[in-house]
Image (tube, helix red, strand yellow):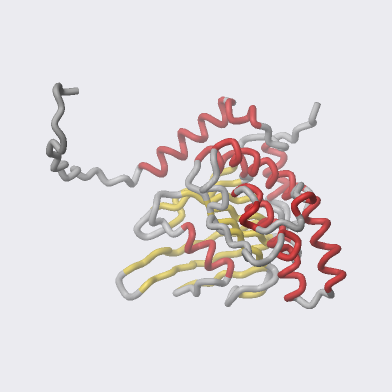
Amino acid sequence: MIEQEDSATRIERLKNRPLILELDGLGKQFGPDLTILKDISLGIYRREFLTVIGPSGCGKSTLARILAGLETITSGEARIGDEPIIGPGPDRGMVFQKYTLFPWLTVKQNVMFGLTAQGATKGQAEGEAREWIEVIGLTKFSDHYPHQLSGGMQQRVAIARSLATRPKVLLMDEPFGALDAQTRLRMQQHLIEIWQNIDVTVVFITHDLDEAIYLADRILVLKPNPGEIQALIDVPLPRPRLPEHLQTTEFKSLKEELGELIHSHDQVEEDEPLHIFRMTKVDDDV
């Protein structure tokens, strides 16, 4: 039987750790009239797993790209440790929803890429890559090319490539969004197992409420137009997380709460009527 840690104890321990990411009044505009993010102030703890949810257009992906250094900010500040985030850096890795492996490189070569770019010798990079490929369970596929892998396998390689350089923070922008339900659950379990055994903080963007709850220590809820913090919620579930947690009262209650928060900003609009005409002759109506 797996021993589980009480959720309140776990959250209290989490909040005694040092902050690894700090956002202070962060804002992002595109042009003079479009505000994407407004006054985002938040501290994210070392080795925390934070999921970010919200309706479309609330700036989730923009926030991840800012933390990765791929987007500039308009106002406020974002810091990793004591350093302002002003561009990409080896202290942050990112995994996207779209498959981003280099198609001309094998699995091993993809995982080696960041290591060699940072100055590792070929031997050092190969040794490190082999370890990560073993961690993600793809040793038999180390010499395969991306087109020879399933979608779930490709994302496992992308995670290994991002983690091989030992970043402090792993940013994930809906990485499992294109996967089928069974593969998605397996990938969530793989990710939790990896995260629990390495020193990395995860910021995970998702539209899926089940995924947000199942993975997270805390959930950041953004509201849209512009994107502002609506809520920051502790997840009242023990770790390690198990599939049966999806059926608990605590899980279902939190999912209902999150659904109400996200849909509280829905605008009810009348649909334009469909202009339908009969396109073929039939003998009767259905």
Q: Is residue 274 left or right of residue 248?
A: left
Q: Residue at x 55, y 44 (%)?
A: 179
- Position of residue 280 measured from the top left corner of the image (x, y, whole percent): 16, 35
Return the residue nearer the eye: 14 or 158. 158
Q: Is residue 273 above or below residue 83?
A: above
Q: Is residue 210 above or below residue 117?
A: above
Residue 193 quadrant: top right
**Tally of numbered discs:** 0
Q: Is residue 122 left or right of residue 33?
A: right
Q: Residue at x 63, y 30 (%)?
A: 245
Return the residue nearer the eye: 201 or 229. 201
- Position of residue 152 measured from the top left corner of the image (x, y, whole percent): 62, 47
- Position of residue 53 measured from the top left corner of the image (x, y, whole percent): 49, 49
Q: Residue at x 81, y 26 (%)?
A: 1
Q: Residue at x 58, y 77 (%)?
A: 86
- Position of residue 129 measured from the top left corner of the image (x, y, whole percent): 79, 61
Q: Is residue 2 above or below residue 17?
A: above
Q: Is residue 94 left or right of residue 17?
A: left
Q: Is residue 150 above or below residue 278?
A: below
Return the residue nearer the eye: 149 or 154. 149
- In the rendered image, which quarter contains the C terminus? top left
Return the residue nearer the eye: 283 or 95. 283
